[in-house]
Image (cartoon, rainbow, N blue to C red):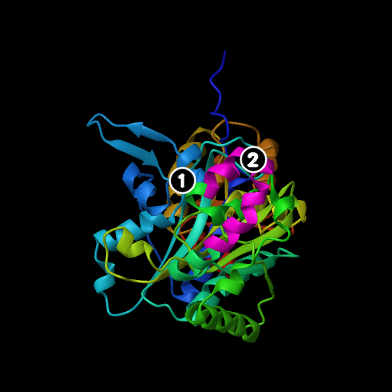
Amino acid sequence: MSIQKPKGTQDFLPGIVEQWQRFEQKAREICARFHYKEIRTPVFESTELFLRGVGETTDVVSKEMYTFEDKGKRSMTLRPEGTAGVVRAYVENKLYGEPDISKLFYIGPMFRYEQPQAGRYRQFHQFGIEAFGSDDPALDAEVIAMGYEIYRELGLSNVRVEINSVGNPESRAVYRDKLLGFLEPLKDQLCKDCLARMDKNPMRVLDCKVDQHLFEDAPSILDSLDEECTNHFEAVQDHLTRLDIPFILNPKLVRGLDYYTHTAFEFKSEGIGSIDTIGGGGRYNGLVSQLGGPEQPGIGFGIGIERVLLVMQNQGIVLDPPNPLDVYLISMGEQAEKEAVKLLYQLRAAGIRADKDYTSRKMKAQLKSADRFGARFAAILGEDELAKGEIVLKDLGTGDQQSVSLNDWINQLKEKCERGV
């Protein structure tokens, strides 16, 4: 029996992985415009980081983490999300000591043990940003606008932004009492997960997909916000309106992680079955201090790359293919084939995308390969050309061809590639 990939994982083969590369390229381009810089953190961390940073009452921690004991008897966990690790790095490396706010982004794999389905995998990939050092509502709007801009430039249609405020600890304490008063009469109808959440974190009951129909008349947290939270949330909405970012208020949006404060938001789109969330995030003003740092506010989001690419596929969006080969080198004859090895290296060293045949096929078969690879030119070297110190350069778009001196052919080819002719 052959060995197969683990359940809930994927192989990204040539032809598919290029779409990933284009997504990452677009994300990096937009990060540069918004002045976010890349950070890379370990794919596994101390389990305590996620217990403290994500929250023991969350499904992520209680049900989905890949946790193991290393040879030093330390409990380690494959990262289930990106924010906690970035905050740990921010604190450990004292980035809070810099005079300006820290604006960071990450791209990489995350791991959660859950039932695989369309758009949901046990190893999945996220692009995310985190900004530390300011509680200005304008920064909330910038973060939301940045995510929206990524979807817009990728060409996705019907993306909607849903926002809510989950308040500060004082507002949530008031809301907690109101929510529990609403939930108590429903206890006999709630699922076991909701019953557990009622005791530990009642707001997360509203995130349940099973019992959602029971919460239509649930009290809104927006009615429990104090003046500080109300002013902050109204300012965020005002900025989004000025930026012409369409948004919908969703008072039941609480997100699935415990560290959120004030603004919470999600990006949604149809096209992946019952799952419609393709990204989301919010503000987490207490997380830095909770993980050992000073009192520093933060805000960020995470985008599920698999989900975005799946929506793009369903909407018929194909990102521009990567640059094809500039030239495919064809050699005929023993001495020509030996010379082609050197010429191929010289082409690549000159910055030209090039390849050759390694199976000694006939010229017709090699020309077919050049077409399949999308090469703009074929460079043909036979024994006669080699004796004359020449090579035949054929434009595969027009069919035109000319003999060029081997002493200068790479420069001539490079000029043609740069001019697009």
Task: Say above or below: 114 vs 418.
Answer: above
Give the residue type at disc 1: Pro
Q: Which residues are magenta?
A: 176-198
The image position of residue 225, as x and y in percent, is 54, 74
Q: Which residue carries the number 2 mark? A: 191
Nearest to the observer: residue 248 or residue 410:
248
Mark drawn on residue 80: 1
**Residue 359 lies in what quarter of the image?**
top right
> Toward the viewer: 4 or 57?
57
Residue 244 appears in the picture as rendered: yes
Q: Earlier in the sequence, mark 1 or mark 2?
A: 1
Residue placed at 61% from the left, 80% from the top?
237
Residue drawn at point x = 75 percent, y = 65 percent:
158
Residue 361 versus residue 17 in the image, above or below: above
Say which quadrant the C terminus sits in: bottom right
Distance (Cα) linking label 1 and label 2: 25 Å
Under mark 2, the amino acid is Cys
Image coordinates of residue 75 in percent, x first then y, are 31, 36
Residue 376 appears in the figure: no
Which quarter of the figure is the N terminus placed in?
top right
Vertical placement of residue 237 versus 46, above or below: below
Question: Which structural element holds mark 2?
Answer: loop
